[in-house]
Amino acid sequence: MTDSRVTWAACGLAAAAVAIGVGEIVAALMGGQSIIAAVGALVISLQPPGAKDLMVALFGENDKLALEVAVAIGGILVGGLLGLLARRNRQFGIAGFMGFGVVAFLLLQRDPLAGMLESAISASSAVLAGVGVLYWLSASLNRPMAPVGSGAAEPARAPVGMGRRGFLALAGTFVAVGGVLAIVGRYLGSFMAPVAGPGVQIPTQTGTNFAIAGLTPIVVPNDVFYRIDTRLDVPEVDAETWRLRVHGMVDQEVTLTYADLQQMAMEERFVTIACVSNEVGGRLVGNALWTGVRLTSVLESAGVKPEATQLVGRSFDGWTAGFPTAHLAGAGKDALIALSMNREPLPAAHGFPARLIVPGLYGYVSATKWITEIELTTLEAFDAYWVPLGWSKQAPILTQSRIDLPRRSGRVAAGQVEVAGVAWAPTRGISRVEVQLDGVEPWRQAELSVPLSTAAWVQWRVVVDAAAGAHTLEVRATDGTGETQTSDRTPPAPDGARGYHGISFAAE
């Protein structure tokens, strides 16, 4: 079998796939950090303006999975280039794998939770696996090659009867094996990390939760609550060593332990939170019962200086969110440093040991997960993570409504059709929801569920008469101040999507 660029590229592809897979398996078994996640974190930190909005629009809550797949594919393709380098001299390919091992180690060390030993072992395991496969496969190519540490050529060791197709099939098998190992490793890493539990049944008074099959529950269980953040993994923050530091423009700096917060007066709040990337009718919104310490109580203990106009929350990994301190004197007065969600300890995926829940503001400016710092500063002095990427610095959640039933493009029996959904305007509440059939009939007012709080969404329902045939439905909500959401459609950037949610369905 004669060698070619294709066969040598195949060597590199196979070696890189196995290297990635072994690295993920070793990291998961050791409880270390994922190399794929580490590379993905770098990509996220370098993203251009608009990238987040595009990824969420394309993939929704699967944006992290899409990025991980892209990182893995990119790593495999780089391996193909290293295979071509190895065709000239195998030492070049081996040096390339070693270089990327060093890069992987350095990227792992950027994560505050990554241990040096675990990072070194997972990175070196990936390098050894990749070099081993590259060396073994390349020895099967019918070409004199320069062995490691020598300028002389060594005879090829080509298996008898293996042709080009057989070799490519063998390399493809290694790629597939590497892919399976990577998937298993990522699964094990997620399985071994704390995850959101199912949530307990929250008792609510009669009328607060319509019993309609397929309608979003008024309190969303922890395991299906949306998750949007910049982490590709689920951080395991140790509550014993965790600290919350309050500093900046304060009279005295305050540092609190997890135990300190647990001993303080706890309050419960039903609060609907939403991602600014949520499209009209999207699912990146949810309502939960949050329990924690009133944020203003902690700030009072530090003594906020009058000139402080911005509160910045900082996560353990440096991610930041900032909002005006004036919000805490008004609509956001019930903001919490939350320790539990739906009466369970805060799930790791949602910010354990503690996170901020600030009613009325989109999460990107307020809902800091895994929070370790609260800094008081001015609006002019600091721009939090998403602001330089083109998102608005002030981001109140807009009034929105969504149709859950009937399903988009669904089929229902002609006649009386039950239409239902949810509507939200946190801190303002919802006063009215209306639906319109086929864009010509008068707007019909829906029945609303009993509000759990002005910061929580409501369910709504109404019956329309739909004759056999195709139909369209639109919904609009009016908040507690009397302002009705606009019909003008806008994209999520820079401060939230606007417009009526509409669906089509067929009655038969």
Image: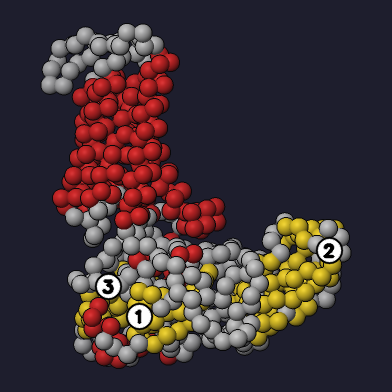
Check disc 2: other Cα within 10 Å, few if <14, some if 14-19, many if 20+.
some
Rendered image quadrant of residue 417: bottom right
Q: How far, Cα to Cα, is label 1 from label 3?
A: 11 Å
Residue at 20% x, 40% y is: 124
Residue at 31% x, 34% y is: 18
Rendered image quadrant of residue 193: bottom left
Q: Amino acid at mark 3?
A: Thr
Check disc 1: other Cα within 10 Å, few if <14, some if 14-19, many if 20+.
many
**Which labelled disc corresponds to residue 372?**
3
Q: Position of residue 437 (x, y in %)?
A: 80, 69
Element class at badge 2: loop
Q: Amino acid at mark 2?
A: Ala
| First in sequence: mark 1 vs mark 2 | 1
- Quadrant containing the C terminus is bottom right
Residue at 34% x, 66% y is: 348
Check disc 1 and report the residue beneath it.
Answer: 337
Q: Amino acid at mark 1?
A: Ile
Check disc 2 and report the residue beneath it.
Answer: 414
Residue at 36% x, 72% y is: 346
Check disc 3: other Cα within 10 Å, few if <14, some if 14-19, many if 20+.
many
Asked whether, in this view, residue 235 is left or right of residue 460, the answer is left
| First in sequence: mark 1 vs mark 3 | 1
**Number of callouts in the render?**
3
Picture layout, residue 191 above or below residue 241: above
- Quadrant containing the N terminus is top left
Rendered image quadrant of residue 22: top left
Q: Nearer the viewer, residue 69 or 383?
A: 69
Residue 273 in view of the camera = yes
Q: Nearer the viewer, residue 309 or 472?
A: 472
